[in-house]
Image: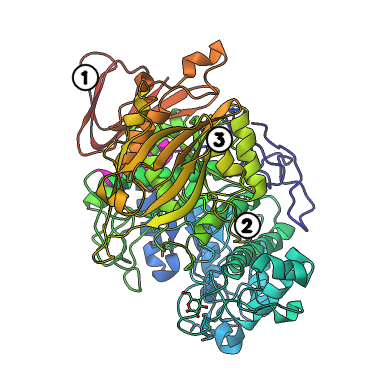
């Protein structure tokens, strides 16, 4: 991938270049890696820049966490630094919630404590990722300007006292926030120990939806910009339904509470979600630009929230506006799903980063404190989880937080230094992790690029928002969780998929899978058709392509995306949905699948799903394609009761030089695994034609063991293999090439290239 040394940023107001121009640039843009030819280096991105460490050559894997020295007396700071040095900490995120300490009253600024701690840390070789400190505003500001507080959908003002209690569209709040940003930039812009800007914190965590009058005004302006005329907006929202036609943009409403049983216009709600995302992104950009005007030469980031249960913003857009991408990843108890889920979230992060390194800005050393049950990590997981993030492309491993708080809402959240102090299992593991990360960095892992899969599971934030509408055949749709189920199915089948935003370029993949991508525009449908026509394999899930970008249902048969192009590609046409659910008393909770076309029974794919079970959603379809093949049907008494017996459930249709599969019902991970193994782990059309690609063709034999997560990171100098057992059982590896770099919970066998990796262990080899 081409780097952009010396490129001018798009940051408005920042006139200087933020590429390498000074004799000692504060960051790197040309770290090794980025060699993959088919990742798109987007031109609408601000340039990639990675903060240098305070090490001799500036390189290394960043290791540390959120540091809140303002919660402690200064006497403790010395001990903090001693322990940080002991653990190998080289980076901290500072002042995230410190606005009140920095600006204790409107006209008083107090930087002394911040100067002192940045200096102390810096002298110890610990770099500061300095927050814009706007995540929590001081109470005096709320007291003076209660109008900056957001409102909930009932019109109630949210109270101050927590975090992100501000309206992203409040001009008053913005003025105060930008003043703070400028003050910080003036004070620390040239401080050599401050190596990156940590903007806000988890934008949208508490103010994703704001129903204030500021928001209403801003939404009207946003709609005017987007639609130009009120007719276009009426058309988009379908306001002839329930007599909601508007004469002017002054009549545009935000979806405030309209009474207990009223349903929100889904088109309006969707635009409100987009608007909320855009307003927070605009706020981030305003903060960034205020700092960049004064300090143009330090990289900017903000922590995304991609993990088990959330992916709430359209981070595909946010990724274009940061110099490097960062994530906060929190695990949820899920037994053996935990590692798979981590890898799945990280796969999406790696796509946002376009193969460049990215930051784990927060994860936990052990338990969190915000769920009904907060389990600690299992034996080995504290180190394993961090190394798993590295295996998935992260070059920075940070935690919330450095020292466990003695008070406040998060005092029972795990930290790097627990309440019991230094002489603890947990702190020893933190030290072991620091040592291991140094070993990996010395071996050259930093900057190497995660090897791509030839399969992309496509994720769309807008479809994620749309599936939450209360107006769909089922309220149980969950796009993000379906992405994860497919991801796990690929792992079970011995191959790793990538997760790529629908709006990015995925045309270089061989297979793309669209699970519950409810919304497809005509343009995106055309991209899918072009991809298949050129030899790609498209897999369409059960609730994909039903609505367009305005939440209008595509007509003429399901899934009708692109005026029917999608169902034509698939060679089927859906008439109705069949919805099931265990909680509907007296109704069946599942339908069984049987064999597909008996005429094609020479093909083993037609019996792959025999006996599989669907429990939520079945599409009642006709087969329309002359060459369409039915791979599974609905079968049995329940299927017959619902008029589905013998109806196609899963199909394959040739399209141009490629093919299109329809998985017309929900399936659990084990049944999806059968499908991936039986139907996709065969040569894809893109493999077939050229003899030189035959070697890379995926055949069932080339699949890896499903018991292991195997990832590969490559730089021009070296290739690194990471092996992590996915289950409870240890894994035995034989004939593995490469020099062992990390053997965490791993034993080396007598015979060269053989290893036993225990549960939650990690083996890293260098070739
Ligand atoms: C009510 C309303 C209709 C329609 C139906 C839907 O009966 O009168 O307008 O909303 O419910 O079930
Ligand atoms: C989030 C926040 C942190 C902290 C952690 C706790 O990620 O950014 O400040 O609250 O959650 O898990």
Quadrant position of residue 140: bottom right
Report the residue marked by disc 3. 57
- C-alpha span from label 1 to label 3: 36 Å
Q: Secondary structure at mark 3?
A: loop
Name the quarter showing ligand 2. Answer: bottom left
Q: Position of residue 22 (x, y in %)?
A: 72, 41
Residue contact at pointers 2 and 1, CB within 8 angstroms: no
Residue 17 colored in magenta in the image: no
Q: Which residues are magenta?
A: 380-392
Q: Secondary structure at mark 2?
A: loop
Q: Is residue 42 left or right of residue 685?
A: right
Report the residue marked by disc 2. 549
Of the image marks 2 and 1, the number of the one nearer the N terminus? 2
**Mark 3 sits near ligand 2, with its Cβ under 8 Å away:** no
- Image quadrant for the N terminus? top right
Q: Position of residue 546 (x, y in %)?
A: 54, 53
Front position in the image: 66 or 76: 66
């Amino acid at each position: 991938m081409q780097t952009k040394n010396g490129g001018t940023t798009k940051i408005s107001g920042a006139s200087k270049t933020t590429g390498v121009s000074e004799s000692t640039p504060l960051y790197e843009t040309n770290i090794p890696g980025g060699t993959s030819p088919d990742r798109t280096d987007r031109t609408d991105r601000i340039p990639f820049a990675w903060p240098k460490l305070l090490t001799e050559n500036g390189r290394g894997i960043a290791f540390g966490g959120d540091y809140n020295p303002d919660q402690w007396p200064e006497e403790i700071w010395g001990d903090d630094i001693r322990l940080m040095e002991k653990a190998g900490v080289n980076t901290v995120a500072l002042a995230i919630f410190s606005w009140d300490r920095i600006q204790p009253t409107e006209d008083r600024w107090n930087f002394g404590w911040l100067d002192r701690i940045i200096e102390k840390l810096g002298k110890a070789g610990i770099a500061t990722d300095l927050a814009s400190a706007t995540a929590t505003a001081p109470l005096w500001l709320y007291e003076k300007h209660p109008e900056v507080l957001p409102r909930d959908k009932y019109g109630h003002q949210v109270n101050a006292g927590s975090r992100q209690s501000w309206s992203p569209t409040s001009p008053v709040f913005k003025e105060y926030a930008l003043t703070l940003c400028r003050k910080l930039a003036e004070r620390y812009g040239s401080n050599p120990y401050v190596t990156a800007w940590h903007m806000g914190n988890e934008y949208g965590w508490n103010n994703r939806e704001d129903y204030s009058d500021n928001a209403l005004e801003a939404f009207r302006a946003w709609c005017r910009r987007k639609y130009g005329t009120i007719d276009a907006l009426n058309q988009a929202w379908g306001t002839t339904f329930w007599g909601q036609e508007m004469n002017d943009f002054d009549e545009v409403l935000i979806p405030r509470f309209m009474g207990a049983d009223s349903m929100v216009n889904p088109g309006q709600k969707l635009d409100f979600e987009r608007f909320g995302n855009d307003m927070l992104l605009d706020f981030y950009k305003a903060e960034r630009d205020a700092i960049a005007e004064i300090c143009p030469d330090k990289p900017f980031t903000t922590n995304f929230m991609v993990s088990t249960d959330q992916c709430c913003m359209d981070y595909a857009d946010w990724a274009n506006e940061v110099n490097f991408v960062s994530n906060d990843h929190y695990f949820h108890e899920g037994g053996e799903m935990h590692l798979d889920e981590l890898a799945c979230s990280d796969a999406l992060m790696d796509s946002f980063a376009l193969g460049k390194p990215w930051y784990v800005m927060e994860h936990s050393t052990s338990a969190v404190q915000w769920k009904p049950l907060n389990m600690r990590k299992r034996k080995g997981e504290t180190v394993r989880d961090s190394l798993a993030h590295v295996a998935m492309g992260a070059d920075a491993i940070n935690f919330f937080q450095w020292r466990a708080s003695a008070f406040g809402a998060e005092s029972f959240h795990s930290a790097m230094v627990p309440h019991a102090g230094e002489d603890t299992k947990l702190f020893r593991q933190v030290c072991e992790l620091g040592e291991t990360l140094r070993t990996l960095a010395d071996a050259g892992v930093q900057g190497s690029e995660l090897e791509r899969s030839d399969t992309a599971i496509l994720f769309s934030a807008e479809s994620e928002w749309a599936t939450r509408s209360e107006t769909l055949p089922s309220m149980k749709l969950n796009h993000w969780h379906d992405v994860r189920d497919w991801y796990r199915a690929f792992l079970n089948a011995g191959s790793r998929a990538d997760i790529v935003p629908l709006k990015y370029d995925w045309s270089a993949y061989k297979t793309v899978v669209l699970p519950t991508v409810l919304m497809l525009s005509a343009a995106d449908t055309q991209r899918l058709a072009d991809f298949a026509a050129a030899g790609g394999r498209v897999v369409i899930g059960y609730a994909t392509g039903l609505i367009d970008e305005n939440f209008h249902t595509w007509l003429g048969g399901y899934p009708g995306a692109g005026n029917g192009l999608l169902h034509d590609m698939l060679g089927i046409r859906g008439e109705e949905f069949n919805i099931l659910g265990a909680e509907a008393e007296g109704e069946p909770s599942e339908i069984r699948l049987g064999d597909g076309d008996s005429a094609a029974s020479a093909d083993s794919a037609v019996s792959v799903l025999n006996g599989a079970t669907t429990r939520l959603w079945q599409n009642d379809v006709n087969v329309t394609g002359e060459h369409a093949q039915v791979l599974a049907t609905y079968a049995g008494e329940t299927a017959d009761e619902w008029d589905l017996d013998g109806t196609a459930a899963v199909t394959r249709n040739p399209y141009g030089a490629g093919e299109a599969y329809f998985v017309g019902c929900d399936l659990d991970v084990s049944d999806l695994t059968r499908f991936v193994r039986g139907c996709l782990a065969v040569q894809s059309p893109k493999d077939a034609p050229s003899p030189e690609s035959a070697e890379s063709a995926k055949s069932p034999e080339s699949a890896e063991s499903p018991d292991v997560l195997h990832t590969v990171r490559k730089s021009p100098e070296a290739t690194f293999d990471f092996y992590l057992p996915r289950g409870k059982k240890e894994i035995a590896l034989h004939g593995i090439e490469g020099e062992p770099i990390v053997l965490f919970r791993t034993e080396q066998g007598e015979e060269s290239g053989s290893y036993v990796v225990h549960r939650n262990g990690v083996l890293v080899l260098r070739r």
